[in-house]
């Protein structure tokens, strides 16, 4: 099912420059969905996040191709494949005490995302992403509770804690940020605003050993770096002692891992990694996908401008 919105047909030609005193979320909710309500802000974030995850699925859009986070692709000359972190191929998720394999795609896979849903049933990964990006983009209508029309962020305070067992590289984080930027650009978000979003994400996530930073005011300063392997630039205000030693995730399901992660003995795997949910077939990217290449670490942000021009 394609999400069709008549006002999106005007994207790219009718949007004026965003006023400096209006947030990205508030401005584009009004520009694309006419009324700046909590429900419409939630819809905008759903459209952008779902597109970033699975690639273009809406019609119309402004013609910018988005391969999607789940599609393998190149970043700065390095092949990136993030799917095994989502489908249970790797023991890379933090259950609070250990690294485990979790299949976040076993409740409908990409199909509910194409219908502007996070999943067929109850799920937290996508809904938390909607909420988190709502805060980053300045959505003024987010409510204080989980029962609000567009709830404030209800997830883990530290993104480092969420991602600590993934051992993400600079290329992997850069590819993720690039998909978010391309998704925003595909709905007509101005190049300057796309670059601003990329810069914000890069400053939060791209630098290993970064000191605690406040993203969600109610949660206070937290460790937010998710780029933690040896390819990641070190924060100029490094607090490396606050971070655990990075270790490449173990393979939980070799057919799903597709060469990512490291193998181990059954005794080492015991109690740390279990494949969960149903098997999800590999997502085949659309023609031309997997060729998003930008230069440098901060090119995850600044390089987005060149990608969308």
Image (cartoon, rainbow, N blue to C red):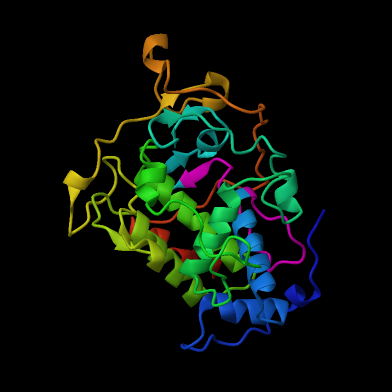
Instruction: Please identify the residue farthest to the top as the structure is shown.
Output: 266
Residue 286 lies in the magenta stretch:
no
Q: Is residue 298 left or right of residue 68?
A: left
Kindly identify the residue that appears in the image at 51 percent across and 57 percent down.
154
Quarter placement of the C terminus: bottom right
- Residue 171: where, in percent of width, then height? 39, 46
Quick check: 278 above or below 48?
Answer: above
- Residue 6: where, in percent of width, then height? 81, 74
Kindly identify the residue that appears in the image at 57 percent across and 70 percent down.
143
Quick check: 307 above or below 36?
Answer: above
The image quarter in which residue 96 lies: top left
Q: How many marks?
A: 0
Q: Is residue 242 left or right of residue 271?
A: left
Residue 55 lies in the magenta stretch:
yes
- Residue 4: where, in percent of width, then height? 80, 65
Camera-side residue of 215 and 280: 215
Identify the main secondary structure in magenta: loop
- Residue 150: where, in percent of width, then height? 62, 67
Q: What span is in magenta?
A: 54-74
């Amino acid at each position: 099912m394609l999400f069709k919105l008549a006002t999106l047909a005007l994207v790219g030609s009718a949007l004026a420059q965003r006023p400096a005193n209006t947030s990205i979320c508030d401005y584009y909710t009004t520009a694309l969905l006419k009324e700046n309500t909590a429900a419409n802000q939630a819809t905008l974030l759903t459209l952008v996040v779902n597109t970033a995850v699975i690639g273009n699925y809406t019609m119309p859009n402004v013609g910018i191709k988005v391969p999607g986070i789940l599609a393998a692709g190149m970043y700065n000359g390095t092949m990136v494949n993030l799917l095994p972190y989502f489908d249970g191929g790797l023991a890379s998720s933090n259950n609070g005490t250990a690294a485990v394999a979790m299949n976040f795609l076993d409740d409908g896979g990409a199909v509910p995302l194409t219908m502007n849903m996070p999943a067929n049933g109850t799920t937290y990964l996508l809904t938390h992403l909607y909420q988190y990006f709502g805060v980053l983009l300045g959505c003024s209508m987010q409510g204080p509770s989980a029962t609000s029309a567009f709830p404030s962020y209800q997830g883990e305070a530290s993104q480092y804690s969420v991602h600590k067992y993934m051992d993400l590289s600079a290329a992997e984080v850069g590819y993720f940020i690039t998909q978010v930027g391309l998704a925003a650009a595909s709905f007509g978000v101005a190049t300057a605003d796309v670059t601003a979003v990329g810069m914000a994400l890069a400053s939060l996530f791209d630098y290993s050993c970064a000191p605690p930073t406040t993203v969600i005011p109610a949660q206070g300063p937290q460790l937010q770096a998710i780029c933690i392997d040896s390819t990641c630039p070190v924060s100029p205000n490094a607090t490396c002692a606050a971070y655990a030693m990075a270790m490449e995730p173990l393979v939980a399901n070799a057919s799903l891992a597709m060469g990512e992660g490291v193998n181990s003995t059954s005794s080492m795997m015991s109690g740390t990694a279990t494949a969960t949910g149903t098997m999800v077939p590999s997502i085949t990217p659309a023609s031309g996908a997997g060729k998003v290449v930008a230069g440098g670490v901060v090119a995850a942000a600044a390089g987005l401008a060149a990608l969308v021009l």
